[in-house]
Image: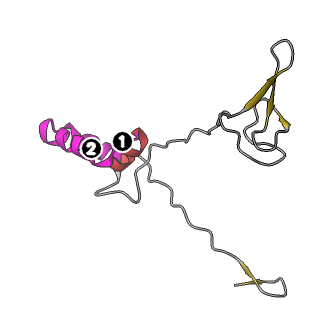
Amino acid sequence: MISYHSVGRGALIMFCTKCGKNIGNDAVFCQYCGTRQTGAPIYAVPVQRRFVRSRTDKKIAGVCAGVANYLDLDTNMVRLVWLLCVLLGGTGLLAYVIAWIVMPLEPLYLEASPTYTNSTGAQAS
């Protein structure tokens, strides 16, 4: 719980719940002790969703998994709906092929290899 103290004309001063020091009104962490202030606003950066075919979760081309990731749905549900579109109307197959051609493949993310240094400070391979 954040501790506030009123100082004339409705102005509020915010105090840290751990160390009790005066911190900024919109502070998320105390600059003195580093404690996260409960009840403080959390500034989250929205995740950028990209409309790409999946490299990892794919059965044929990764189109259903890419659509599911973009729409934040279960991959199997998207596959089931797509299958119903193929079986009942036939347009699902054409849409799948078009999406296969149009949607770019998800970028390949490589892990960085650690660099080791020997006792002299030179990089070892």
| SS label for mark 1 | loop
- Taking the view exactly as shown, the residue that stands out farthest to the bottom is 119
Query: Per the image, is 56 magenta?
Result: no
Instruction: Tell me where residue 8 appears, x and y as whole percent.
Output: 87, 14
| SS label for mark 2 | helix
Residue at image coords 44%, 49%? 104
Main secondary structure along the magenta-highlighted residues = helix
Quadrant in which residue 90 is drawn:
top left
Instruction: Tell me where residue 125 appears, x and y as whole percent.
Output: 69, 84
Which segment did they paint magenta?
72-100
Where is the N terminus found, in terms of image quarters?
Answer: top right
Residue at image coords 27%, 48%? 76
Hey, what amino acid is under mark 1?
A: Leu
Left or right: 122 in relation to 58: right
Q: Are marks 2 and 1 in contact (CB under 8 Å)?
A: yes
**Residue that numbered label 2 is attached to:** 77
Q: Nearer the viewer, residue 34 or 20?
A: 20
Hey, what amino acid is under mark 2?
A: Met
Q: Which mark is residue 118?
A: none
**Residue that numbered label 1 is attached to:** 73
Marks 2 and 1 sit apart, C-alpha to C-alpha, by 7 Å
Instruction: Tell me where residue 51 appears, x and y as whole percent.
Output: 44, 43
In the rendered view, how is the structure colored? secondary structure
In this rendering, is residue 11 above or below 79? Answer: above
Q: Nearer the viewer, residue 87 or 4?
A: 4
Quadrant in which residue 70 is drawn:
top left
